[in-house]
Structure formats: C-alpha cells, structure tokens
Image (cartoon, helix red, strand yellow):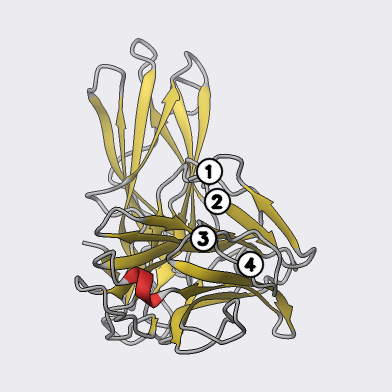
Amino acid sequence: MNGLSYTLALALLCGCDAAPATPGRDTVALTIATRALGGSASYRVIVSNGRGEVLSSDLVSGAVAAPIAWQVACDASAPETRVSVALERLVDPAAMPAGDSILNPAPPEDPLVQDVTCTPGAAVPLRFDVVVIDRAVASEAAWVLHDAGARFLDQWCAAGFEPVDAYLKRTDGTRGPTGILRFVCTDAASGTTTLLMDRPVITCASGARVVLDVAGPSSETVRADDLLLYGTELYRGTDAGPSVYWNTAFGVNVDALANEGACSLSARATTTDSADGTIPASVRWPVVSWQIPLTDADGALVWERGGFDTSSDAQVTRGYAEAGHTFDASYVGATDTVTVNPEPR
C-alpha cells in the first residue's frame, strides 16, 4: 500500500515499545528526520546482524518538528548490520479533512534500508531522511513538498504534458506537431532551488528509441538527428513567482512514427537545494514521472494533455526515486547553470 491516512489527533509525541540501547556500548546511533506537514510520526525500526538474525524490532515515535534520536544495539561479533525503517503512522494535528492521504516513502513492505558496520564499544551514527508527498493539498496541476525546516518550506512544483498541433518550426518554416513537457517549482526561501531531470526517452514497439537532450541551449530550436523528430527546444529560467522552470518541447515526424507501432515517452524530474544529482542512500526522494502514449499500434498519433490527477492516458504522477539514483542533469535557476551527469543513460 502506498498511502497512509492522516489521523486528526494531538497525542503520540513520543512512544516506543522497547527501551533504547545503552549509549556508548555496541550500538547504532539512529537519527530519523521527517519532512512533513507537522504532528508526529511512528517508525518500525528493525536491526539485523551479519548472520541475518533479527536483533530488535522497535516502534519509535516522535514529533516531526525535530529529528528522532534513538540508540539500537548491534552485534560486534557479526558486525555487518542492516537497519530498516518503515513509516507506520503519521499523525497530523492540523485541521485537515478526515481521509486525506499521503504517499508513503517507506511503507512496511518496502522500507528504507541501510547497512553499517558495528564497532565494539562505540555508537555508529546512521541517518534516515523521510520526505513525505502530500496528495490531499496538491491541486490538479501541482504537488508540494513539506519540510519542518528550511529545505522545503511551502515549495510547490507543477508538471504536465501538452500536445500542440503546430508549434516548433520545421526546416521549411512551417510549424508541426509538438509535445511539451512542463516542470516548474517555486523557488525556496534560500533562493537555491535546483531542478533535477532524467533525459526523456521515446520508445517504440519496433525497437526504435530516442533520448532527448535536456542540457542544450535554452530557447533555441535544435534540429534532430533522428528521423522520428524534426527538432527539439528547451526552455529554462526563473520568473517573478519566484519560480524555476525547465520545459522540453519536441517536434514529431508523424509519417515516420506511423511505421514504428505504439510509441511512448517517459521522463522523471524533481527539486532540491543541492546541485548534486544523486539521491543519498538515507532517503527515498520525491519525483514527478511522465508516462505519455504518443502513438497507437497502428502508428496513429494519440497523445493527450496530461497533469496530476487528470483522467487522460497521459500519466503525470508523484512518487519516489530509489535511493542512490543519479539524475541525468541539474539546473540551478539562480545562476542559470546546467550540470550534466557524465554517465549517459
């Protein structure tokens, strides 16, 4: 299950079903930072040793306004230690309608997991960051990341897909059918908002595959080398919102696509305040994903406008990137700088 229900309550500020390990002995000094609307969170923390034996299974709770600190015993005789953290309950004291839900970044069936080495007589530090996407307060065109600290403070992101009958110019000067991926986020109070993006990929039943560039010059049509496209154009920058945007337009050759069977486009993007495009091992990071059907099995163009919570086949969804994922490129709006990951997709 990917959702948790918000419970309207004021209690559960701290509670555990086992006593913490004695500090200074063979322990893991665990820190769990919850980025959510407010209230408190409960986590199931399971610790196993190098022999695969479960050493403890604790329910750890605390207010989201500050990180939860917890000591768990480890086994220095089998020092390779695995710690898993699952978000079991989020209690929000704010006046929210009953039944509103979040996307759980660490459900019990898919917890956050990290490995550490148990050190005799020492407390090994280990940190988990749990970033919650709230679907209930997100409008049809936007999502929101909430943070009790300064990293994401009321920061909104919007994403969508728009097909246009005639937009980018072909080589003969006429305008042709164009698909536009849109992604924009309000700038953080620090002014350091960075957008991260994987290169959009078009794949077809015939085996044809086109990887779109996201790091080329902005507001300049680039002629495509691939027969399926006649050109691409990128739009990056900031506006008076203040917001940071990163849009990708691609012009399709309808006649060429007709020979490739069903084709679709996929892409992913997110926002952070760091230009480092790799998701840390301690966190499962929120992302926007596009999955856009372009043509049907007969090669006919079937693309539709899509956004969050719309009913079209053009799916624009909220979710999480796996820990350790490196995005293809990053864009810092304040400096108008694009950084490309050296490892190609």
Front position among marks 3 and 2: 3
Circle count: 4
- At label 1, counting other C-alpha atoms closer than 10 Å, the crowd grade (few under 14, some 14-19, many 20 or more) is few
SS label for mark 1: loop
Task: List x then y, in percent, for residue 121.
Answer: 50, 15
Whichever of labels 1 and 2 marks the residue nearer the N terminus, that label is: 2
Residue 22: quadrant of the picture = top left
The three-letter code of the residue at mark 4 reads Val
Whichever of labels 2 and 4 marks the residue nearer the N terminus, that label is: 4
Residue position marked by numbered label 4 in the rendering: 222
SS label for mark 4: loop
- Quadrant (top left/top right/bottom left/bottom right) for the N terminus: bottom left
The three-letter code of the residue at mark 3 reads Leu
Q: State how far apart marks 1 and 4 are (Cα).
A: 20 Å
SS label for mark 2: loop
Q: State how far apart marks 3 and 4 are (Cα).
A: 11 Å
The three-letter code of the residue at mark 2 reads Asp
What label sits on residue 328 in the rendered view?
2
Q: Residue at x 29, y 72 (%)?
A: 258
**Label 3–label 4 contact, CB within 8 A:** no
Task: List x then y, in percent, for residue 241.
Answer: 69, 85
Front position among marks 1 and 4: 4
Residue position marked by numbered label 3 in the rendering: 212
Query: Vertically, is 173 above or below 50?
Result: below
- At label 4, counting other C-alpha atoms closer than 10 Å, the crowd grade (few under 14, some 14-19, many 20 or more) is some
**Label 1–label 2 contact, CB within 8 A:** yes
Whichever of labels 1 and 4 marks the residue nearer the N terminus, that label is: 4
The three-letter code of the residue at mark 1 reads Pro
Name the outermost residue toward the top: 77
